[in-house]
DNA sequence: CCCTCATATCGAAGAACGTCTATATAAGAC
DNA sequence: GTCTTATATAGACGTTCTTCGATATGAGGG
């Protein structure tokens, strides 16, 4: 069960959303992210730690570098839970559908 | 098009989520909400203003009281947009399905 | 009009947050 | 071992946020 407040707090920052967009479909090193965004390296590390604590990114060390990817299962699960908890009897229903 | 950062910021507070849970399926006056939560009336008014600015609640004045309800369309739309923007090619897809 | 009830706004205090610089840690090359 | 590269952590600073008490506004009753 996901803590909806913690989930929303993790999403509630412009820089973190930029990081999430970058890591959404590829593994990126911290330096890759620093190069892509206009913020200092410790700032990126800080935001990655926040996202990691919320379960929204996975990290993997390879040699000197650490690669990050978005945990999309977790992201989608958080979105579903927010929608379902706050809009239970809603005529437009949110459905998780497994593609073939 | 919903601003995903603003949407997440509006959700990113415990008290606001409590208010959203209360107003999810009923119209409540400010006093109803104050009675249900353990916070002062100006605090509730403040959070309602934040939610309103984000489009997450609707308000309706009836006599001396103002009644608030959750805007569930908006909430679900925000959740969908977050999921779709950050997990585009995800094998588990988020679908908005209209019930009969 | 004045009074009362319901809500909104103001202003301040304290906490939480985002960002930076400086420094520490981790890992590989030599 | 030392040196270099990559990332994390610590500490400081300014900003934003949450909360409150006090006060203003709005609406109806007498």
Image: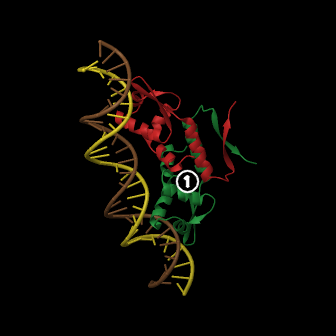
Chain colours: A green, B red, C yellow, D brown
Query: Does B95 appear above or below A32?
Result: above
The foreground one among B39 and D11 is: B39
State the residue lying farthest toward the right: A100
Q: Could you tell me if residue B40 is visible in this image?
A: no
Q: Residue at x 59, y 47 (%)?
A: B81
| Viewer-side residue, D30 vs A23 | D30
Task: Give how far across and how far down residue B80 sits, in percent.
Answer: 60, 44
Badge 1: residue crowd in 10 Å (few <14, some 14–19, many ≥20): many
Secondary-structure class at tag 1: loop
Question: Residue C5 at what x, y percent from top left?
Answer: 33, 22
Q: Can the viewer see residue B62 in this picture? A: yes
Picture coordinates of residue B46 (x, y %)?
A: 39, 38
Q: Is residue D6 left or right of residue D22?
A: right
Front in this rendered view, residue C21 or A29 = C21
Across and down, in percent, residue A57 comes to: 56, 57
* Residue drawn at (49%, 58%) of the image: A15
Residue A70 location, quadrant = bottom right
Residue name at image x 58 percent, y 48 percent: B82
Q: Residue at x 46, y 27 (%)?
A: B28
Horizontal side of residue C7 vs A98, given as left or right: left
| Image quarter (top left, top right, bottom left or bottom right) of the N terminus of chain A | top right
Residue denoted by label 1: A56
């Amino acid at each position: 069960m996901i803590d909806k407040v913690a989930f929303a707090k993790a999403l509630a920052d412009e820089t973190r959303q930029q990081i999430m967009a970058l890591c959404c479909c590829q593994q990126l090193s911290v330096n890759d992210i620093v190069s892509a965004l206009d913020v200092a390296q410790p700032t990126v590390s800080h935001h990655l730690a926040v996202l990691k604590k919320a379960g929204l990114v996975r990290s993997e060390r390879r040699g000197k570098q650490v690669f990050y990817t978005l945990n999309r299962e977790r992201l989608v699960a958080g979105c579903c839970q927010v929608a379902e908890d706050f809009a239970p009897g809603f005529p437009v229903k949110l459905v998780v559908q497994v593609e073939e």
